[in-house]
């Protein structure tokens, strides 16, 4: 999911859209890209960060995506694909390199709901669907007091039902990350990215209390796919960036 989103963002990026730069080394070759930019938006208390660049002269594109806690860019932040929702995609003349978390914790917000439950008790009440009392002589003239007494004493009864509202939630709520991994409860595994890694250090630059630029470094082990061949793990080294932040919120 994260990698598909990054690929889509690469396709959407205009050429030389920003003023920032990105450099890195992969598969024994060094790249320096210009025109990088960063976009930051806040959704549901989380910061969604995208750093992207498409450099036609270098014939290379790169996108880094990350999800951070709402106030995490007040100071430098270290992210790792082993524990954070962070991914990267590099496209160049050699092919596509990508990395994403091998293990992701499933979200539970949309899986919590309140359900109405009806519980049968040992108490009884008159069955409102019972019409046998209408044949009694006391009820010949309609619902008189005598008819009501006859119905109460001889009418069909049923068990009372109590209504309660119960909140349902996934079984993994309340478990630690390690407990979920150990039990396999509420996790998703992307086997393609087993034995990969990606680390990013974000250093925010503020002017008058406003975030205006992100400097950072990155490195890791990415998957390289060539045609239908199995993915090969390739080291990514010496990654650096300095990008202006658009729409900081």
Image (cartoon, rainbow, N blue to C red):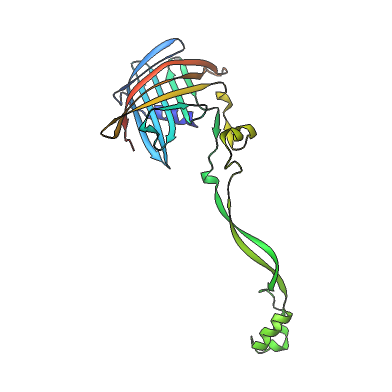
Q: Identify which residue, 130 or 201, lies in the foreground.
A: 201
The number of numbered discs placed on residues in the rendered structure image is 0
Residue 206 on image: x %, y %: 29, 31
Closer to the camera, 187 or 209? 209
x, y (%) of residue 129? 67, 73
Residue 35 image offset from top left, x and y in percent: 31, 22
Q: Quadrant of residue 192?
A: top right
* Residue extending farthest left: 208
Q: Residue at x 33, y 16 (%)?
A: 57
Farthest residue toward the front? 75
Q: Position of residue 225 (x, y in %)?
A: 52, 18
Quadrant including the C terminus: top left
> Which residue is more in the foreground, 54 or 204?
204
- Horizontal side, residue 222 vs residue 54: left or right: right
Residue in the picture at 70% in, 81% down: 151
User: Is residue 170 positioned above or below 210 on the image?
Assistant: below
Q: Quadrant of the rendered structure where residue 28 is?
A: top left
Nearest to the observer: residue 64 or residue 15: 64
As displayed, is residue 176 above or below residue 227?
below
């Amino acid at each position: 999911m994260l990698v598909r989103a990054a690929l889509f963002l690469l396709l959407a990026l205009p050429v030389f859209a920003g003023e920032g730069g990105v450099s890195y080394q992969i598969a024994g070759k060094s790249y320096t890209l210009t025109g990088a930019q960063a976009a930051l938006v806040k959704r549901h208390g989380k910061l969604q960060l995208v750093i992207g660049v498409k450099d036609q002269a270098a014939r290379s594109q790169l996108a880094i995506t990350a999800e951070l806690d709402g106030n995490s860019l007040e100071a430098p932040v270290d992210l790792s694909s082993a524990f954070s929702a962070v991914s990267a995609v590099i496209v160049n003349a050699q092919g596509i390199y990508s990395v994403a978390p091998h293990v992701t914790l499933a979200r539970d917000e949309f899986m919590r709901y309140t359900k109405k439950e009806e519980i049968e008790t040992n108490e009884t009440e008159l069955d409102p669907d019972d019409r046998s009392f209408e044949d009694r002589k006391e009820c010949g003239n309609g619902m008189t007091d005598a008819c009501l007494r006859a119905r109460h004493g001889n009418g069909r009864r049923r068990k009372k039902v109590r209504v309660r509202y119960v909140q349902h939630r996934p079984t993994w709520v309340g478990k630690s990350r390690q407990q979920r991994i150990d039990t396999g409860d509420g996790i998703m595994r992307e086997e393609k990215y087993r034995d990969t890694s990606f680390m990013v250090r974000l250093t925010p630059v503020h002017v008058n209390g406003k975030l205006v630029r992100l400097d950072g470094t990155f490195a890791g082990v990415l998957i390289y796919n060539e045609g239908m061949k199995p993915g090969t793990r390739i080291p990514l080294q010496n990654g650096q960036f300095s990008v202006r932040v658009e729409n900081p919120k």
